[in-house]
Image (spheres, rainbow, N blue to C red):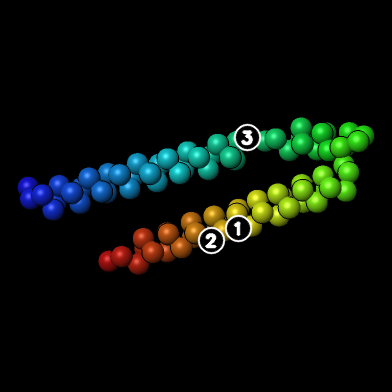
Amino acid sequence: MTMAIKAHKAQLAKLTGRIQELDAALARLKTTNNTPELMKNIGRPGWTTPAEIVFALGLIDAMLFQAALLSQMQATLLKGSRAVK
């Protein structure tokens, strides 16, 4: 087996591992539900000052953007993998 083939196989193994790592990371996000605690916390008196609301809304908006972006990136990766003949 040539060095190029060995290197290619090593790269594919690394890619496979990273895909599995990503899958596990996304699964952890899906199974971790902090929403009930967050909703309880923000409902407490004194927590929701105008500054805290701005801060929290900014974080939530950024997280929503990132979630949409991850979904788009996943679709693009899958579409690209299907296009290889």
- Residue 5 in percent (x, y) is at 14, 51
Rendered residue at 60%/53% (across/down)? 67
Residue behind mark 3: 32
Rendered residue at 89%/33% (across/down)? 44
The outermost residue toward the right is 45
| Amino acid type at mark 2 | Gln
Callout 2: helix, strand or loop? helix
State the quadrant of the C terminus. bottom left
First-in-chain label (2 vs 3): 3
First-in-chain label (1 vs 3): 3
The outermost residue toward the front is 51
Q: CA distance from mark 2 to mark 3?
A: 22 Å
Are the residues tagged 2 and 3 within 8 Å (C-beta)? no
- Disc ID at residue 5: none
Are the residues tagged 2 and 1 within 8 Å (C-beta)? yes
Callout 3: helix, strand or loop? loop
| Amino acid type at mark 1 | Ala
- Residue 27 in percent (x, y) is at 53, 39
The outermost residue toward the left is 1
Residue behind mark 1: 68
| Amino acid type at mark 3 | Thr
Q: Is 42 situated above or below 54?
A: above
- Disc ID at residue 72: 2
Rendered residue at 82%/44% (across/down)? 52
> In this image, 55 relative to 43: left or right?
left
Mark 2 crowd level (few <14, some 14–19, many ≥20, 10 Å Cα):
few
Q: CA distance from mark 1 to mark 3?
A: 18 Å
Rendered residue at 70%/49% (across/down)? 59
Mark 1 crowd level (few <14, some 14–19, many ≥20, 10 Å Cα):
few
